[in-house]
Amino acid sequence: MDFLPTGFLPGVPEERVLTCLRRAPGNELAPGKFDSPESSAALASNAFGWFLDRPGLLAPLPGVPMGRPEGVEIEAEMRFPWRGGKHPRFDAAITTATTLVGVESKRYEPFRPQKAADFSLAYDRDWREGLARYTALRRDLAAGRKAFRTLGAAELIRQAYGLATQGARQGRGAVLVYLYAEPERWASGKPLDPAAVALHRKELAEFAGLVRGDLVSFMPLTWRDLLAQWAATPATAAHAGALLARFGPL
């Protein structure tokens, strides 16, 4: 039996969100995990879960080339062109008439120790045209020629491969949105090192430059800018306010 979280905001379809969380890896419904004051899953599930039943109210994400949203999922899987193994998941996936958008949300994760870049032999293959920059970076990471201290670059590359695969199957373009927070403090109240925040921004810009021009567009976006857009839109203003009240400055 899983733990039933109490942290859902008004208007979020609780049962639909719970179903998505149950089928996802990561055991997000373990006791105390989803309700943790530092939970990234709680933030993303509440933010985008609100749109599951009302995708038409979601505006195109700020600065993201995508068109008007037609469908929204959370904990969305983007499968590779093979059956076995693990396949990448996104905190949210947004479908428009022309574009498949995968949203990877980060809150405090960049400021914790990062895992070493690791790719199985299954990734060492010829991917479809248009992913040469992601593939070159994957090889540099695997060989130790490149490393990031605050950015989960290996995860982002796997997600780009998954997005490219599913975008091609659907006949849509693919965009990978890296949605990140820049909190000033940990949930405990301890100040977060400003140097770590600055390094994360620097590495994010570097990653974006290294993969710019490939088939999967990489678009960094702050939670601050996204919630400002929602707050300025009458249909989503109350939802933005509820998110800020629950999760604090992002």
Image (cartoon, helix red, strand yellow):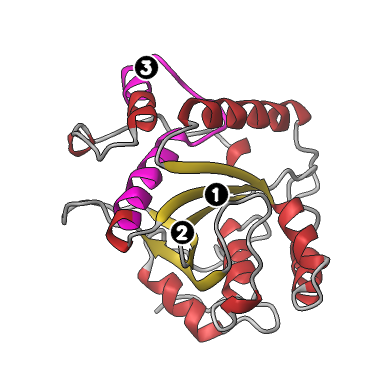
Few, some or many residues within 10 Å of mark 1 (<14, 14–19, 20+)? many
Tell whether label 1 touches label 2 (CB within 8 Å): no
Tell whether label 3 touches label 1 (CB within 8 Å): no
Q: CA distance from mark 3 to mark 2?
A: 34 Å
Q: Identify which residue is drawn at 34% across, 48% down.
A: 164
Dot 2: element: strand
Q: Which mark is residue 121?
A: none
- Lower position in the chain sequence, tag 3 or tag 2: 2
Q: Tell me the quarter of the image containing the N terminus.
A: bottom left
Task: Name the amino acid, label 2.
Answer: Thr
Q: Position of residue 166 (x, y in %)?
A: 32, 57
- Residue most extreme to the top: 145
Q: Position of residue 243 (x, y in %)?
A: 74, 67
Q: CA distance from mark 1 to mark 3?
A: 26 Å
Which is in the foreground here, disc 3 or disc 2? 2
Residue 164 sits inside the magenta stretch: yes
Task: Name the amino acid, label 3.
Answer: Gly
Relative to the observer, which residue lies in front, 100 or 8? Answer: 100
Relative to the observer, which residue lies in front, 178 or 130? Answer: 130
Vertical placement of 246 versus 212: above or below?
Answer: below
Q: Identify which residue is drawn at 29% across, 51% down.
A: 165
Q: Identify which residue is drawn at 81% across, 70% down.
A: 241
Q: Which residue is mark 3?
A: 144
User: What is the span of residues highlighted in magenta in the rendered image?
Assistant: 139-167
Q: Position of residue 91 (x, y in %)?
A: 50, 60
Task: Name the amino acid, label 1.
Answer: Val
Residue 160 sits inside the magenta stretch: yes
Left or right of 140 on screen, residue 82: left
Q: Which residue is mark 2?
A: 99
Q: Which mark is residue 177?
A: 1
Tell whether label 2 touches label 3 (CB within 8 Å): no
